[in-house]
Amino acid sequence: MAFFNFHKNTFKHGIHPPESKDETNKLPIKQFPFPPVIILPMAQHIGAPSQIVVREGQEVHRGQLLAKAGGYVSVPLHAPVSGTIRKIANVPTISGKMSQGIFLEAFPSSTQEVLEGEPIDPETATPEEILQGIQDAGIVGLGGAAFPTHVKLKVPDGKKCETLIINGVECEPYLTTDHRVMLEQENDIFTGIKYLLKSTGAKKAIIGIESNKQDAADYLEKYIPEGLPVSIKVLPVKYPQGAEKMLVTAILGEEIPSGKLPIEVGVVVVNVATTAEIGRLLPHGQGIQERVITITGPGVKKKGNYTIPIGTPLRFVLEQVGVDEEISEVYMGGPMMGVAVSNLNISIVKGTSGILVFTKKDVKRSPKTYPCIKCGACVDACPILLNPSKLGILAKFEAYDEMASNYNLMDCFECGSCSYVCPSHIPLVQYFRLSKQIVRKREAIKKEKVDA
């Protein structure tokens, strides 16, 4: 079955999985209770882990610096609650690896007010001061990638940012985090855009929103501050339109070259929830302590959108919302690009956009995998026009170098569209994820040998 492009304002190919957003997209954001103990891994963003600056037994206030940035591609970590540092030890992470972490016991009677810092004025601050403020606030991409935002916003020498795109697409099924942020935090979003325009030098901002969130588009349109160069672009619903390359193509009609970033066509893309956090935190000189998360799925009793302290243990979250006794799988993130967790003792981190819970009756066991029948469904679905069928065959024969050099393996951003449409149930995206890891490891070994 081919996937034709009937709309101008979108990208080629893509798929249309069930949206499954109706149960939470009308539910206002609620504050989640503070757990007795917060568990904070230092490795919760792309780049170098944060470096702990507190000691065991120390009392800290909410918003206080707990760990400094471990380098340029890194961010600090702030206390999500006022309490006592009970332990510094290794903690499990969603990747399966252990990370150095902090166990922070909350003061049960504390008001949990946040410490005020040095405010940054978007009108008078320099671009460099804004970028430094964003790093100091510990802000990373909240759409799931968790890439340090100050690094993303730094326009390389010789490049120029003409357009800032605010990503409010939220194409992942089930997730309604960004939708509710757009309906409830408009002032923070527009304040954040002021900082982003100043720091990137962009002349205008476009907020991209899919048509299944028309209410958010209408609401933001009504509250655009006078004189702020912001427009709203409503796009047809299609997955994975929230991916940067796809969104730039959908809004501007520009193709980003293979292996390049949006800045190659004069664009910087920032998630709408990340934008709101910038607008919320920088005027007060504060660090990020919490984020909005969608908790949903057939196995959840109290579905909703919640503001949850970073470091809240997943087990505590599930206890609070109530879950079915017959839980089969729990995902952090969406069902397409999220990760099935193997340990309920991991914590909410800055990049956690959703928690999905499925019961045994909702999850089909992995069907038998059959040989590729060359139907071309995966080729028609791939949004960046790769040949998943050929890549899958090469992965089976461990021809990783050929995958990377001749078939653009590293352009794959693991959206899962190919696996979703494959009638033979070949786990293509898992093959590509593993293949990319092997290619990166080989490249790192080569680099070490050259440097030596």
Image: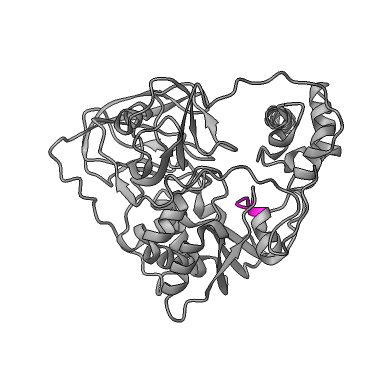
How many numbered badges does the structure rendering display? 0
**Left or right: residue 432 compared with residue 185:** right
Q: Residue furthest bottom?
A: 227
Give the image location of residue 145, x and y in percent: 54, 43
Identify the residue at horizontal 71%, vertical 18% (top origin). Answer: 368
Q: Tell which of 359 and 85 is nearer to you.
A: 359
**Camera-nearest residue between 312 and 81:** 312
Point out the image quarter for the N terminus: top right
Residue 91 figure quarter: top left
Residue 305 location (% of width, % of height): 38, 46
Q: Residue at x 49, y 66 (%)?
A: 127
- Span highlighted in magenta in the image: 241-245
Using residue 174 as the reference point, say whether residue 398 is left or right of it.
Answer: right
Q: Is residue 136 visible?
A: yes
Write the residue at 67% across / 65% down: 159
Does residue 282 lie above or below 65 as drawn? below
Task: Give the quarter of the image for residue 415.
Answer: top right
